[in-house]
Image (cartoon, rainbow, N blue to C red):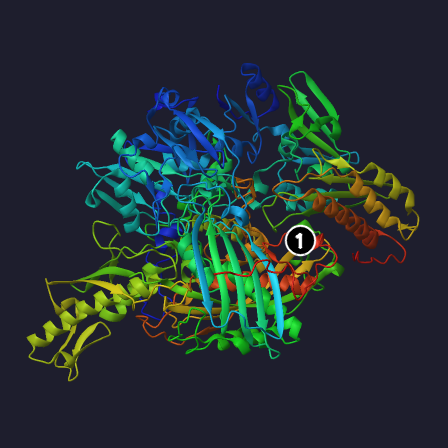
Amino acid sequence: MGADIVGELIDYQLRVNGHEHDVADGWLGESLLYVLRERLGLPGSKNACEQGECGSCSVLMDGRLVCSCMVLAASAVGAEIVTVEGLSPGYNELSDIQAAFLAEGGVQCGFCTPGFVVSVHDLLEHNPDPTELEVREAVSGNLCRCTGYGRILAAVRAAQETRQG
Amino acid sequence: MTVVVPACLEEAFEAFDKCPDAQLLAGGTDFMVEVNFALRRPPAVVCLRKVEELKGWRLEGGEVVLGAGITYAELMGPQLGDLVPCLAQASRTVGSPQIRNAGTLGGNLGTASPAGDSLPVLAALDAKIIVASKNGRRSLGFDELIVGPKRTTLGPGEVIVEIRVPAALGSQEFLKVGTRNAMVIAVASVALVVDWAGRSVRCALGSVGPVVIRARDAEKFISSRIDWTGRELTGDDDLAEFTALVRSAARPIDDHRSTADYRRHAVGVCAQRALGRILANHGGGAWEQTSWAS
Amino acid sequence: MSTALDIRRGRIGESAARPDGVPKVRGEFAFSSDLFSEGMLWGHIVRSPYPAAAIRGVDVSEALRIPGVRAALTSDDVPGRKTYGLDYPDQPVFAWDVVRYMGEPVAAVAAVHPETARRAAAAIIVDYAPTEPLTDPVVAADAEPIHPLGNVLHRQRVRTGDPDARGTVVVEGRYETGMQDQAQMGPESGLAIPAEDGGVDLYIATQWLHIDQEQMAACLALPLEKVRLHLAGVGGSFGAREDLSMQVQICLLALRTGRPVKMVYSREESFLGHVHRHPAVMWYRHHADADGRLVKVEARIILDGGAYLSTSTAVTMNAACMAPGPYRVPNAVVEAVAVRTNNPPCGAMRGFGSVQVCFAHEAQMDKLAAALGIDPVELRLRNALKSGDSLITGQTLRGTAPVAEVIRTCAAAPLPAGGPVTATELELPGGAGRTADRDSVRRGVGFAVSIKNLMYGGGFDDYSSARCRLEDGVATITCAAVEVGQGFVTLVQQIAREVLGVVDVVLAPPGTADIGSAGSTSASRQTWMSGGAVQQACLAVRERLLTSIASRHGLAREALEIVEGRIVSLDREVDLPISEAAPGEVLEETAEFHHAPTAELDADGQGDAFVSFAFAAHRAVVDVDLELGLVRVVEIATSQDVGRVLNPVQLVGQLEGGIAQGVGLAVMEEIVLDHGRVRNPSFTDYVIPTALDMPPVHIAALIEEPEPGSPMGAKGAGEPPMISSMAAVVAAIRDATGLELPRAPVRPQDIALARPGQGPVAGSSPITQEVSP
């Protein structure tokens, strides 16, 4: 397959969710989103726009929330990458944020959900008790077309309260 | 060589030597859009995210020296928010938290979009942009760097390394008009700086021309109308005249985002409100801000 | 910190947890774009950049020479019918002689890597001769035909009463709504795997498996049993997936190459590659008496159907029939026509024709109220439909119609506290852009009410199928009803638990090979139709089970019932858990649920064409920066006629989600066209509300009057939230600005640059032609 791809092919390593992953014969222009999904078996991050306009591909890179579609995969060598898969605890278990999303009805089609889980995780790590406006601003880079955000905000509130109380 | 992530400028210049066709990658928020949509197929990439010389910022003799790799999120920090308030204000309007964590000031300059959010601020502050190559460094004024829509005078092998702006200069305001409250390309924007000590006003307009426009006639006029001791306008019609001059400086177009007429109107409203706000908050005397009812 | 999720609660009326929720939050749910098959190729469609052009030739030879390219196909390669369509097959799989819209497919390639496929697509040479596109819907009907079937897609007339009736007060207006896009997050995507029997298995996100299968089989020249569709995870829909997208193309590529083929649309392709909401131009004239009671409504509606038919017929019918809104109208002269243009094809989007007319009829009601000096809410109450009233189609409302209560409860909701003076910077219009000057910000309040017909009608015998299988206390339900996010899968479990008393309910993966059609996930129909089918199948299984247990114990069937998961007799002689009731036995029943028959409309649009209706009211509060024309929607309050609440949290999700789309259409969403070219096919420039744009939703009341004929008394709830929310927001902006604002979405320049004299008037442009027979 490698010989058939038109364009420069490269090999490199990425550190994702605490593990080293080898990428072999990758096309140099592949985004981190593409590599996560199509090469590393981590399709949790989603491809709703590939333009940095929807947040469905959100990951943490060296502790900062970014759109993985906006990261050239080969340039992320040496960075600590955390995806939604890395924020999910053991088999079939849920983090408090994930449980809150389900309990509060914050999941409909679910396409935006992984991006939101990562963004909310990042928010509550940096600001454990945000106001509603701060939550809205923190997730303003995550588009949802199904929920109208109401139940998502309720989920964040519930997770917040669980952590405070 | 394909994708290189140098740790310092010297390594970056070595990479360019080896591969003169290599393309520069900063935060990726413009670059990757083009790659993902097959508008750009780089033969090789020099990624700047680890270059030490581009990181952080420092104070140096009355100037804030910003590393070109500084992100919008970092520009919103409390210290920089005090030293360059309108840059912090502009940064908050960029994209989303995700974009603000990745996008860089150097990248915004390098892309040189007519709608780049930091650009009116840098123009109003008369920023000096330091560019480096293996042959040394040179300093460019804002107008010397950006000469057309998405056109800079950067040569091959050149990297923007620093942006120098005055520290805590006067009173500053940045206003941006967009059709929604996040992730929106500016339809019109204004950066206004009132330099009390220097007795001058700078007013830069974004998204209303092929490049950022300094409304120089408006600046000259209003600077002459401010009572610098009392920190107020001397004439009742001064604000209206200022606004009209700002509008005549704008060269907006119709496009799918907005109309020339609206952009011209909006940029005037924003300039007028920016000045009114500064005079109300930092001016002396009984300045009453009247509403601009049409 | 982790919490295991308890999934054991959950009957009808409870906020039962979604069965697909855990994989969704963990990022493990397989959407159609997540599918993988060993050795798969990537497909890519070549699309016309022109809205209208003749095709002189297509040359794929260059593309085939690129290493890694395995196939390049055009219309010549379609073995069966070369066109498809939901109502009539007028839309080409690949255009051949002529392209009729920007983005129309002309060819497709398959290659080993998506980048290779993109390069191959770029290497296909299509010799276009661009022609002048027909883009004005107002003149389209009389213009040169751009298709052999002509430019009129459908005409629907509704006339009742006396066409010459007059009122004491007359108000008129010309209204426009723009082209909205569904903008669902999950891009169109699928995976086609060629089968050994010469057929194909398609894993696809869609809205109706069986109608896709029917169309595909005709194009692929394969019998139905060789075209097997399996539902893949759907990332939202809202009408975008009702028509075929890539289904035929990737199956052709798979059958040609002998390898699995995956295709995922980019966001730009998604915007170009699915139907949109019909833009509308509407002329209305309302006559009323001095007390504000409606005497006559005249309306002429033109819907821009774009290049192909899609579902324009039904959209037109809905628009015409719902044209006056949820009010008693004794005399009506209405004509709606959908026309063909070289604009992008339009079809199903949540609301389906009623959104456009609601914008117009609610603006008219406000004009009437102003002309008469009557409170706008009071005016609506005076005219509100109730059970037993007739629509303008002559149909008597036999179901529930709590319109007055919907209006009253919504209007009575307390207004939000605060205002522009006390709002923080981020809460003012313009948000972080910091543009607002508090002195220039005005608050406005607007109110609107809507009617939506639920499900299909017009004589169409709609049905849904479901199978229930009970084995060792575990119920397995097979139903092809597509889950697009609305929560139907949750409801299935709730129904099975309710009827059978089981806890464990397994959902078999939906596919065409396993079960009959469940109809489309659209028209607010699945709860009624597929919920009904599931209920019927479960009831049949329950009946057989209880009959069998009863006879085993020599009891009458009536002596047994199911209580808390146990089969018990009245005297408790029989008392056993369901799981032990029929050990080793499998009880299986398949049901086909039909709704009560409807009739076709006659030449005057008269007939009992609809099954049921739902009503909703919305009140919007907005803050408007008058000089810049920027709008902040502060709050939306709503009441909705829901029949019965089956799952509270999921119902709230439908209301809030639909309202968000209404807010979007009111102030920011529009596909911008320039001579047929789409100028903004991206999320950068087709803007939908973010969390900073969407206001809180206050649910004033959920009116529960169980609907006769509905299996569980519930009415579909998906569409009503979309309809009057949009009209209410624009009404609120009118209240704040004093402007007529006859067009949605309202753009900043519509407010900021309004000419003097564009204030609210009793009549604007006259209807220039009387609606003629």
Q: Above or below — where is B155 with respect to C548?
A: above
Q: Above or below — where is B285 with respect to C47?
A: below
x, y percent for residue C589:
17, 63
Q: Nearer the viewer, residue C549 or C517?
A: C517
User: How many residues crowd mark 1 within 10 Å: few (<14), some (14–19), many (20+)?
Assistant: many
Quadrant into which the N terminus of chain A falls: top left
Please give the chain letter of the residue carrying mark 1.
C
Residue C42 is left or right of residue C724, and the answer is left
Residue C130 is left or right of residue C480, and the answer is right
x, y percent for residue C351:
45, 59
Query: Regarding mark 1 in the picture, which secondary structure is present there?
Result: helix
Which residue appears at 55% of the width and 41% of the height? C680
Occupied quadrant, residue B294:
bottom right
x, y percent for residue B276:
81, 52
Q: Above or below — where is C708 with respect to C104?
A: below
Looking at the image, can residue C622 be seen? no
Q: Which residue is mark 1?
A: C750
Which amino acid, by three-letter code, is at mark 1? Asp
Occupied quadrant, residue C196:
top left
Occupied quadrant, residue C251:
top left
Residue A140 is left or right of residue C112, and the answer is right
x, y percent for residue B265:
74, 47
Looking at the image, can residue C463 be seen? yes
